[in-house]
């Protein structure tokens, strides 16, 4: 498995590679905690959550790499038209981007984006991500990864 997985990871776009490696790192951390818990407490019931969490993280990492290797993702790049901010801390909550004459609304995860109107945004979206229409704007159900594109 390792001989087939690592060449695929090296060929991924940098942002998607980071997402896959973060999922594998989460799995590794869970398995380390599993071993520590097993050695210190010697109780199988305490080890079960770490085992399940590690298996889920590793499985999500493998599924992400498999999806990307099969080309089942879309790169959506557009110009930010409007930034919706949170009420209290004024961090970006959602953005509306213009793409091919259509407006697409995307709810941001993490809210650590420093976006302003006119910025370029690149999103990697799974090909089966649900897209809804609301008031003439397409609302994207989620995304795999996203980055602000620097011009120049």
Image: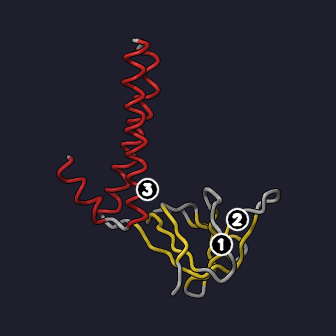
Q: Residue furthest left?
A: 3
Badges 1 and 3: C-beta atoms under 8 Å apart? no
Return the x and y of residue 44 as percentages of the image width and height. 40, 15
| x 37%, y 49%: residue | 61
- N-terminal of the pair, mark 1 or mark 3, is 3
Q: How is the image coloured?
A: secondary structure
Q: Secondary structure at mark 2?
A: strand
28 or 137, which lies in front?
28
Q: CA distance from mark 1 to mark 2?
A: 7 Å
Q: CA distance from mark 3 to mark 2?
A: 21 Å
Residue 60 to residue 8: above or below:
above
| x 33%, y 67%: residue | 71
Q: Secondary structure at mark 1?
A: loop
Badges 1 and 2: C-beta atoms under 8 Å apart? yes
- Is residue 121 left or right of 6 when viewed as pictured? right
Q: Secondary structure at mark 3?
A: helix
Residue 124 to residue 53: above or below:
below
Q: Name the residue that disc number 2 marks.
A: 92
The disc label shown at residue 115, or none: 1
Q: Name the residue that disc number 3 marks.
A: 19
Q: CA distance from mark 1 to mark 3?
A: 21 Å
Residue 95 to residue 67: above or below:
below
Q: Tag 3: Cα neighbours inside 10 Å, few (<14), some, or many (≥20)?
A: some
């Amino acid at each position: 498995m390792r001989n087939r997985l690592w060449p695929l990871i090296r060929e991924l776009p940098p942002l998607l590679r980071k997402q896959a490696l973060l999922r594998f790192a989460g799995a590794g951390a869970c398995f380390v905690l599993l071993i520590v818990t097993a050695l210190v407490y010697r109780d199988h019931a305490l080890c079960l959550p770490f085992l399940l969490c590690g298996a889920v993280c590793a499985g999500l990492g493998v599924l992400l790499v498999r999806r990307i290797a099969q080309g089942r993702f879309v790169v959506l790049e557009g110009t930010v038209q409007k930034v919706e901010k949170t009420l209290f801390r004024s961090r970006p909550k959602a953005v509306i981007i213009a793409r091919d004459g259509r407006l697409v609304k995307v709810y941001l995860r993490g809210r650590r984006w420093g976006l302003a109107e006119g910025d370029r945004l690149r999103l990697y979206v799974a090909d089966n991500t649900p897209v809804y229409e609301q008031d003439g704007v397409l609302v994207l159900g989620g995304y795999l990864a996203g980055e602000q594109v620097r011009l120049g």
